[in-house]
Image (cartoon, rainbow, N blue to C red):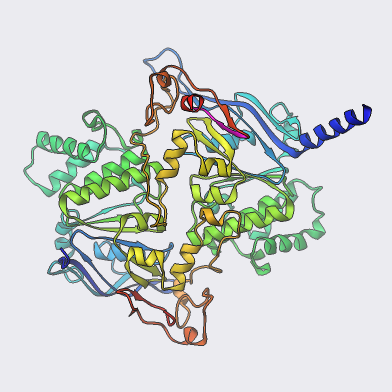
Amino acid sequence: MLVILVNLMENMKTKQNNKILEVDNLVKDFVLKQKFSSNSPGILKAINNVSFSLNKGETLGIVGESGCGKSTLARCILRLIEPTKGSVKFLGKNILSMPKEEMRQLRKKIQIIFQDPFSTLNSKMSVGKIISEPWAIFKDIVPKKDWDKKIKNLLISVGLNIEDIDRFPHQFSGGQQQRIGIARALALNPEVIICDEPVSALDVSIQAQIINLLKEIQSKTNISLIFISHDLSVVRHISDRVAVMYFGEFVEFGNVNQIFQNPKHPYTQALLSAAPTVDFSKKKEIKMLDKEPPSQINPPTGCPFHTRCLYKKDDCVLTKPDLIKIDNEHWGSCHLIKNS
Amino acid sequence: MNEQKIILDVKNLSVQFKTLHGLVKAVNDISFDLKKGETLGILGESGSGKSVTVSAILGLLEMPPAEITGNIYFDTINLTKISPKEMQTLRGKRISLIHQDPVSSLNPLLTVGYQLCEMLKVHQPGLSQSDAKKKAIELMEKVKIPSAKERIKSYPFELSGGMCQRILIALAISLEPDILIADEPTTALDVTVQSQIMDLLQELKSYSNMSMILITHDIGLVAENTTETLVMYAGKIFEKGPTEKIISNPNHPYTQGLIDSIPRDQKKGEKLFVIEGSPPVLTKMPKGCPFHTRCKMKKEICVNETPLLKQSNDSRLSACHFS
């Protein structure tokens, strides 16, 4: 009996340990400037009850149109923007209630790579300085005498040359600048890297190099990635699980095959059909979204997607669908899912 | 229908810039033509010379530093020989352009209605304000902007990126040009909006038998929207021919590499194909084939001799020693 209990507890422990990041009912409301004419300030619901967990060594893709809250979510996880409600747990500890110094220490563990590589690098610093700056801030990571060696190792691991150490950001191409950004993110041995559209500004041939590099780093270090992109083919390639975001919410969530081969939410279907393909053999069935996303200041009633949905029913206008389980690990929020 | 009239004929066009770092050969002896009603795709990475080519066609390059050689025939007019004044009457009226970034292409201090009316009045002197406004609303309806009557008073920042792009399209098509050049028209937009904009362009094109040049680095966009394609690299044309043939069966190793490096469902989880290295610096062009520094099929001949654009077996041209 005792053995079983111990086993069970052990099991639970490993299961819990596997989860590196847990986001629970995260909400971010932006309060808008008060207008003369109105007496109550407007509220923009940027993120609305988002929950998910990230496992060790896993890649979670987040897709959605601009303005759906992808980047706000990334910044809320890092507390670059303070969330309004909810919790973000890193290895079981709630980040949001952490005191300043503890949070600062934790930033080592969660790093971010941005979309535009050039503007994220200080143009007056050499590459060596850019990569070693984190060590100057967190002094316990690498002793100063090893900096030179470690920088060179990092440069090699992201596919740059050792001689690049004294060069400046403007002397590199966009793809190489993104590699520098990745090297800087890796300098502190993080456990999670949030990639906010890391390849959107790059050419196709360079994009493939960066995706391969991220995959390679992941297989070596078992790092977890949150990969935000509007490019569905890239997300499909790199992710284990995918969340489709619309209007500040996850409207569909599942593993990559469930989302791409068996999309249940009409929005996911529309997104997939809108992406251009190079396959002439596949006849395209367009499930076009004619209108633009609704205003976030005056959100529509019921399902936020009903203004653009092809399968709209009366129910959709009145009540908001919950995120319900469709299949093992596959979740969706649509009235149609319930009925089918 | 088969023998369509050639509306734009570019012959041996080269564009060079004299800079402090040396001579930049942005476009290097390219020739192509555009038929009436045709959509031509120009595919290439950044720095391949796509935008410089169309800027040369539109007479938008400042000379110096730019130096243009070769000829560009539009109908019977040689665009490289006419004065800037004459060019101004053609630009917008017969050849017009849509830019990549819709929001920054519009004046942020003026309403979209003002900008539409201003353009109409410049090209049609004597048009009254009320007629111009009526025409502007008509144009906005043509590009499917909902409630155009109210939106005419909007400033660009009040509209979404997709809506601003529609305004730009309205500006570009208002004078019914013969050629519409779309320079990365949807790069700054979401996929859903992208497909709306491309559908709109196709629809407008079919009304008026307008020709279109679509410049992009997105292979999928070229595949779905064009009939003919040019692949450019380092200021040169690498491959040219019917889009479907080029994309389903590329002749040039560069085109092949580009297509292989797109993530696709059947390759999920595998390592993506990568074209090693990066495009050459235009001031230090390598000898021989400009692609030889990155090419997997490189032989001695590639380092020494520049391949010419030559006809291969099936009505397309490619510039590789081995195709």
Task: Choose between A114 and A335: the one closer to the eye.
Answer: A335
Kindly tell me whether residue A93 is visible in this rendering. Answer: yes
The location of residue A322, given as percent across then percent down, is 54, 23
- Decide which of B309, B59 is in the foreground and name it: B309
Vertical position of residue B213 compared to residue A335: above or below: below
Q: Is residue A157 left or right of residue A14?
A: left
Relative to B143, B284 lies left or right: right
Disc count in the image? Answer: 0
- Whether residue B262 is in magenta: the answer is no
In the displayed structure, would residue B307 be above or below residue B149?
below
| Residue A169 appears anywhere in the view | no
Q: Residue furthest left?
A: B126
Q: Is residue B179 above or below residue B249?
A: above
* Image coordinates for residue B311, horizontal then vertical, percent: 32, 79
Query: Which x, y percent locates residue A181?
Result: 61, 53
Q: Quadrant of the N terminus of chain A?
A: top right
Report the residue that reaches farthest toward the front.
A340
For residue B70, side relative to residue A53 (left or right): left
Q: Quadrant of residue A214?
A: bottom right
Q: Nearer the viewer, residue A28 or A228?
A: A228
Q: Residue furthest right?
A: A2
Q: Where does residue B323 sit, x and y in percent of width and height?
A: 41, 79
User: Which picture quadrant has residue A23?
Assistant: top right
Residue beneath the point at 30% across and 73% down = B67
Quarter residue B243 falls in:
bottom left
Range of residues picked out in magenta: A329-334
Relative to residue A1, is residue A203 drawn left or right? left
Q: At x 44% / y 35%, what residue is drawn? A: A267
